[in-house]
Image (tube, rainbow, N blue to C red):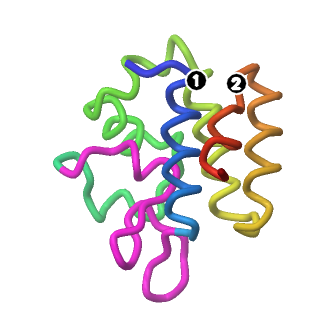
Amino acid sequence: MLTKQQIFDKVVSHLLHQGERATSEDGRCSYRGQNGTQCAAGCLIDDEYYSADLEGSVVYSVSVRRALQLSGVCDDYNNNEAPLDVLRSLQSIHDFDEVTDWPSRFRAVARAFNVDPAVVDYRLN
């Protein structure tokens, strides 16, 4: 199971490397988007547990939580919401903030959840 730090590092590294939102053909943010893109949560869901049925569901939904659990991201979010809260914050940045604003927003999430933001600077260099 992943810690808050591991989730932060993996998702931020993925999004900064990707450099764009994962969107469907109609422009909506997606767990799996065009050209192989993946959103903050989508990059944590193993292919075998991804289903188009997840699209349109929020990170806190039972179906997405189950896909994350099967992918080894979490064991039981009912007992520990912190990793899910970090992921939801990163997902919100993916969905609503301009890509050029992502680094500063990622740093703000790191401060809020008391994780090391070093991956932001590492990926930018």
Q: Residues within 10 Å of mark 1 (few under 14, many from 20)?
A: some
Most distant residue in the front direction = 125
Residue on which the image places disc 1: 5
What is the magenta range? 22-47
Residue name at image x 68 percent, y 53 percent = 92
Apparent side of residue 124 relative to residue 26 in the rendered image (left or right): right
Above or below — where is 82 with respect to 85?
above
- Report the disc number at residue 116: 2
Q: Is residue 124 inside the magenta stretch?
A: no
Badge 1 or badge 2: first in the primary sequence: 1
> In the rendered image, which quarter is residue 102 located in?
bottom right
Most distant residue in the bottom direction = 26
Relative image position of residue 37 (x, y in whole percent): 41, 67
> In the rendered image, which quarter is residue 19 located in?
bottom right
Name the element at disc 1.
helix
Relative image position of residue 34 (x, y in whole percent): 38, 78
Q: Is residue 36 inside the magenta stretch?
A: yes
Q: Distance from label 1 to label 2 (Cα)?
A: 7 Å
Q: Residues within 10 Å of mark 2 (few under 14, many from 20)?
A: some
Answer whether labels 1 and 2 touch (C-beta < 8 Å): yes
The amino acid beneath tag 2 is: Asp
